[in-house]
Amino acid sequence: MDRTIIKDVMKKIERLIVDKRFDLLYEGDYAREMPADVMQQVVQEYGDNFTMPPDEAFDRMSIVDISEEEASVYCYLWYDNERSDLTAIARVKNIDGEARYTIEDIHIL
């Protein structure tokens, strides 16, 4: 899968987490396996000052291609402008020509 597309999707996910828009994060999730309230609880238990990572952080994400149309992505969340040990694990997939995501987990790595 195209790395630029994956980065754009992960930036969107991170922005929704920083903005505490777990409702929109859940609505945009194609599989909806992790409920919005669970995502919110995990993030809030960690703290309340998540920030957007610098652009170069998206170049260092761990991306595992599952197929030409799908990838699994591990992306650190940032807290107080520093990389935290909290990680978002997502699957990015091309569905009907559109890049979509599902949040598989958010946990401390």
Image (spheres, rainbow, N blue to C red):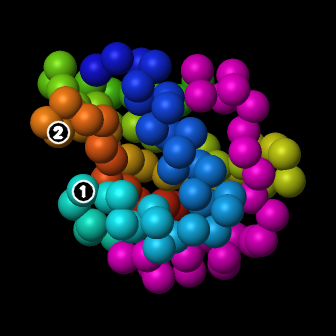
**In the depicted view, which residue is nearer to us: 3 or 84?**
3
Amino acid tagged 1:
Tyr
- Secondary structure character of the magenta stretch overall: helix
Residue that sits furthest to the right in the current view: 80
The residue at the point 47 percent across, 73 percent down is 23
Magenta run includes residue 30: no
Place of residue 63 in the rendered image (x, y in percent of width and height, measured from the top left): 40, 28
**Does the segment drawn in magenta span residue 49?**
yes
SS at circle 2: strand
Instruction: Write down the region rendered in magenta.
Output: 35-59
Question: Where on the picture, by quarter, is residue 58?
Answer: top right
Above or below, comparing residue 47 to residue 19 in the picture: below
> Which residue is located at x 68 percent, y 58 percent?
18
Q: Can residue 15 be seen at all in this image of the molecule?
A: yes
List the residue tagged with mark 2.
Answer: 95
Check disc 1 and report the residue beneath it: 30
Residue in the picture at 41% in, 25% down: 5
What's the residue type where badge 2 is placed? Ile
Please say if the residues under marks 2 and 1 sit with CB atoms less than 8 Å apart.
yes
The x and y percentages for residue 22 are 51, 70
The picture quadrant where one finds residue 65 is top left
Residue 104 in view in this figure: no
Which residue is at a point 69% across and 26% down the rendered structure image? Answer: 55
